[in-house]
Amino acid sequence: MGRLFENRVVIVTGAGGAIGRAAAIGFAKEGASVIVSDLKPDTAHETTELVKQAGGQSIAVCGDISIDAEVQRLVSSAVETFGSLDCAFNNAGITPADDHTWNEDVFRRTFEINLLSQFLCLKYQIPEMLKRGRGAIVNTASIMGLVSAGEPATPAYTSSKHAVIGLTKAAALAYAKQNIRVNVLCPGVVRSAMSEQVMAISEDMRARLMNHAPMGRIAEPEEVAEAAIWLCSDKASFVTGHSMVVDGGFTAQ
């Protein structure tokens, strides 16, 4: 039985982080050639090496994907190196620790990374997929894009994640007839440097997040990555415009 992404090319942004790294490795195990994108060169190259160890071909393309020219370079590098682009997991994002201060600079930067980068990725990824006559894209939002989750005020993060869901639906509808599927992943609390940063705010915050979901634990990065991999695969061939929740039951409450 063939692997899900044999002879396919996948971009993963935020691939130096927990979910992105797990996804890059997972795509590689299923036969993909993986373009690893991250702002930090050291973590990007670490992920690239792990992808190769998992049996995949990989290159690292580092840069700030809230900048148009950097995203154009990312997509061009994928096509120039591997010949095409079949899938993308647009996973890069930030959770600013000082979001609760309602600072304008924090708000603008959060939207640049969490939303504008997604828009730019779609802008350059979709034309390459149209050349192939098919493609699959998964954006990362959050359960905070669906519900308030009862957490302290996070105006930048919460509104940016709502916007990612809206952007995803708009793209999915625009390209459904061209066989380009666009979905959005909405994780709950996941074990990562980002969640550790939030939990470091206070012991109360740590306790709340560790017991956030009805399942009584936080997610492992691989559990979220597997959902993104499935959405990009042909097994999800009739799924588009969907907000997939991976939250241990939190939004079911």
Image: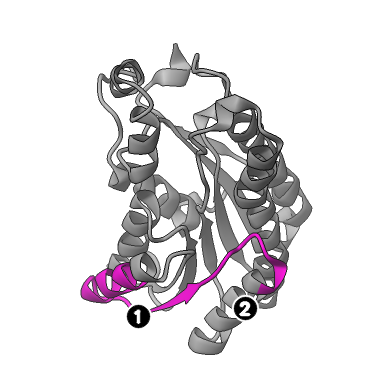
**Direction from residue 46 to residue 82 in the image, left or right:** right
Instruction: Note whether residue 164 is visible.
Output: no
Give the residue type that dot 2 points to: Arg
- Check residue 227 for magenta coloring: no
Give the residue type that dot 1 points to: Gln
Circle 1 or circle 2, nearest the eye: 2
Instruction: Note whether residue 155 is visible.
Output: yes
Return the x and y of residue 178 as percentages of the image width and height. Answer: 72, 62
* Residue bearing mark 1: 57
The local secondary structure at tag 2 comes to helix
Q: Residue furthest left?
A: 53
The local secondary structure at tag 1 comes to loop
Image: 183 above or below 82: above
**Direction from residue 245 to residue 46 in the image, left or right:** left
- Segment colored magenta: 45-69
> What is the number of callouts on the image?
2
- Quadrant where the N terminus is found in the figure: bottom left
Q: Which mark is residue 193?
A: none
Label 1, label 2: how many angstroms apart (C-alpha)? 19 Å
Along the line of sight, which residue is nearer the eye, 149 or 3? 149
* Residue bearing mark 2: 73
* Residue drawn at point x = 55 percent, y = 82 percent: 77
Image: 113 above or below 30: above
Image: 130 above or below 239: below
- Check residue 66 for magenta coloring: yes
* Residue drawn at point x = 45 percent, y = 16 percent: 252
* Residue drawn at point x = 69 percent, y = 38 percent: 163
Which of the colour schemes (rainbow, by chain, secondary structure, one colour) is used?
Answer: one colour
Return the x and y of residue 151 as percentages of the image width and height. Answer: 49, 18
Tell me if mark 1 has few (under 14), some (14-19) or many (20+) residues whose alpha carbon lies within 10 angstroms of its own: some
